[in-house]
Image (cartoon, grey):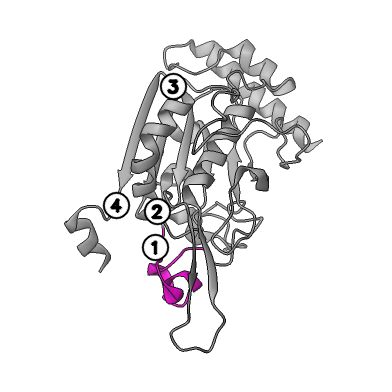
Amino acid sequence: MITTLRHACLALVASSLLVTGNAQAEPGDYGFWTTLGNLFNPPDANTPVTPEQAQGMYPLSLNDPNFNDGFDPADYDNWQKVDVPASTGAMCGNGSPYKFFVYRVPDTSNTMFYFEGGGACWDYESCSGAAGIRGARNPNGIPDNYVQNINLLDFQNSANLATAAVSPLIYTHHPYNQFKTGEWNLVYVPYCTGDIYVGDKTEIYEDATGQNPDLVWHHNGLRNVQAVTSWVKNNLQKPKQMVAAGCSAGSIGALLNYSKLRGDMDVDYGYLIDDSGPLSRSAEQCRQ
């Protein structure tokens, strides 16, 4: 019943676009009838990963029809958790399964990849979480409900308020800032490896105090990004416009992965928003 009502509301919004014409339409936006059809028959991916793209040192992953990722293609305008198969090589630093989050819309193919910010890690203290916010973000892995509560106006549930407040780019109903990308498909890429999304090495870190066992840590960020890219190609329509964005460590992740991400997605228009990245001296001083 709830899904039916949501579809009806979306159809009413789409009908208003029909009345006002297509003056505001952009590359990647669907017309009224296509949008209406998408509500009842969500479109399949039109550029899935090919066998050739699944080769090489850091390949994309072919779609695995036997793996249940938990995604409902018809559940529009809601944050959904997407599980990633271990066969992709993706995982969090502590070895727990990697997962990310998708907010799908019916009226455009345009897509934003948002790389979560956080610190970085290189020893026991920083990777275990003992170093605080400058160390690894999410040292214990990603909770299933990590971004479902992105709503700054929901004062009853503040579990993920920090995630919601990190950027208006991923908060679609921000009370002060509205961006056109807020109406796009959103892919939230969580950060749990402490390697600014480009690591591919497993390290063993010793506790200098000798009080705790060694920490086996998987700097697996690059494979995580490849797993996210693969899923988007295998499950969503190819976007006409794509944004890669992030802040802090996420801005570096967006920057360093942008070229390959744009190439893999093969978009017509690609954009990079590098927000508050510590690659420059002034940005690093702001963090201190």
> Magenta stretch containing residue 134, yes or no?
yes
Sequence-wise, which precedes: disc 2 or disc 1? 1
Q: Are marks 2 and 1 in contact (CB under 8 Å)?
A: yes
Disc 2 or disc 3, which is closer to the eye? Answer: 2
Instruction: Give the SS element for disc 2.
Output: loop
Residue that carries the numbered disc 4 in the rendered image: 277
The residue closer to the viewer here, 100 or 183, is: 100
Q: Position of residue 176 (x, y in %)?
A: 39, 46
Residue that carries the numbered disc 1 in the rendered image: 120
Residue that carries the numbered disc 3 in the rendered image: 267
The residue that appears at 49% across and 10% down in the rendered structure is: 21
Disc 4 or disc 1, which is closer to the eye? Answer: 1
Q: Position of residue 246 (x, y in %)?
A: 39, 46
Instruction: Give the SS element for disc 4.
Output: loop
Residue type for callout 1: Ala
Among the 4 quarters of the image, the one containing residue 44: top right
Left or right? Give the position of 157 relative to 73. left
For the record, the magenta segment spans 118-138
Q: CA distance from mark 2 to mark 4?
A: 10 Å
Q: CA distance from mark 1 to mark 3?
A: 30 Å
Residue type for callout 2: Ile
Sequence-wise, which precedes: disc 4 or disc 1? 1
Instruction: Give the SS element for disc 3.
Output: loop
Give the main secondary structure of the magenta stretch. Answer: loop
Residue type for callout 4: Gly
Disc 3 residue crowd, few under 14, some 14–19, many 20+, Cα 10 Å: some
